[in-house]
Image (spheres, helix red, strand yellow):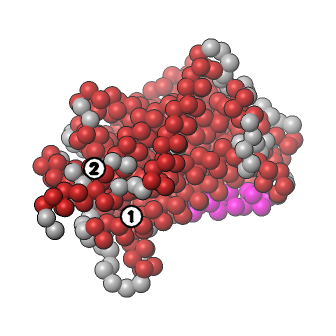
Amino acid sequence: MSASDLSETTPASWGRMDKASRASLSEAHATIHVPKGGTWFRRFLAFVGPGYMVSVGYMDPGNWATDIAGGSQFGYTLLSVILLSNLMAILLQALAARLGIATGQDLAQACRAHYSRPVGFVLWLACEAAIIACDLAEVIGTAIALKLLFGIPLLAGALITAADAILVLMLMSRGFRYLEAFVIALLTIIAVCFIAQMVAAQPPVAAVLSGFVPSSEVVTNPAMLYIAIGIIGATVMPHNLYLHSSIVQTRAYERTEPGRREAIRFAVADSTIALMLALFINAAILIVAAVAFHDTGRTDVAEIEQAHELLSPLLGFGLASTLFAVALLASGLNSTVTATLAGQIVMEGFLHLRIPNWARRLITRMLAIVPVVVVTWLYGEKGTADLLILSQVVLSMQLPFAVIPLVSFVTNRRIMGTLVAPRWLAIPAWLIAGLIVVLNVKLLIDTFFGTGGLTH
């Protein structure tokens, strides 16, 4: 192979990465063994983990708020939005994994390498805003769960969440596989809790299936659109794209073209399976809310605490409320782990700045705790419920700043080499990016001209 041939097949970013930056998440980079022989299933198991860590962001407390509001106000109609956003998430996370494996760079490093400093700085600020908005949802969700399970006041619970930095540090010190095992264990708890609630709810199958069919009302009804975009923002999370492009590189796959191709296949399979679990959880939350609240005339239920209080009596299942709170706590704890990692990856990738993990976690968490404390103090628990849904809309507004760079990179042969996204993948990727921009513009118009907003 000649030098000119090599330049056609090798991503241009490889050389820059070696000279300009260290490996993404360097303490865990290529630390997980991938067997070279054996069955495909044994090799696939080596790649299982990152997808489930990414899926955490698709079922965090912010999803609960938007799903409960959507189910109680509009019944099963927004199931189609959950399905659409999940399909979008599967494709976008597949692209994030492809970028990380093909170039050896995470999305933040790629942005720094290929954009000017001012553009990179704006993208970094947008991503940090998304992480803070996500952390805001985790603080509120975890504080509510602590109150529901142990009677701890909301303000005290919000302050207690700062201690979760210790949990993340302990897990990271044991190795990346321990971190993944912890996440998967909590995901299992969440799934079991909602399977039990779905059995108790006994939703009408025909109504549920019809809810997965798209309705034009989602776009024409401003209140429904607000919740729908909140669901998309809570599902397709900007920082997850940065996270996934980094943690797939923790596998010690062969850094050759065949090795990278196999790694992409396994990583995409891992994230697709994990995100189908996220689809089930999100759909289950909305369905349970629709059965318990919308179908009984309680269309005003939009707060997690209201839902907890009413679940057991309305479903006739004594443990329903407890299972709901346990799953919420597991969701908040899980989101803590992934948000911390995403924050580290983004800061290192964009700024080449490394600070201790505990300091990074405390800074992010304090930025989230302050507004929660202020809003709770001024407006009470109703204010935190509105703040929770608003945080998901803020996340949605940040999506274009992550999605457009990601799609532009993976469809660029100069950056990706022979691992560039094929046309059949590039076309829907650009369509999704365009849809996200259009929905956000529509939301801005409705919000600022008084036709949108919450209608609790």
409 or 382, nearer to the observer: 409
- Whole-percent x, y for residue 446 in the image: 63, 20
- Whole-percent x, y for residue 274 in the image: 53, 61
Q: Is residue 3 left or right of residue 68?
A: left
Amino acid beneath label 2: Ile
- Looking at the rendering, which quadrant does residue 131 occupy? top left
Magenta stretch, main secondary structure class: helix
Q: Is residue 31 in view from this perspective?
A: no
Q: Is residue 78 left or right of residue 397?
A: right
- Whole-percent x, y for residue 316 in the image: 84, 53
Amino acid beneath label 1: Ile
Please give the name of the residue rendered at 59% of the width and 26% of the height, measured from the top-left corner.
443
Residue bearing mark 2: 415
Query: Which portion, as a residue range, is magenta?
Result: 187-201
Q: Residues within 10 Å of mark 2 (few under 14, many from 20)?
A: many
Q: Residues within 10 Å of mark 1 (few under 14, many from 20)?
A: many
Q: Is residue 204 left or right of residue 11?
A: right
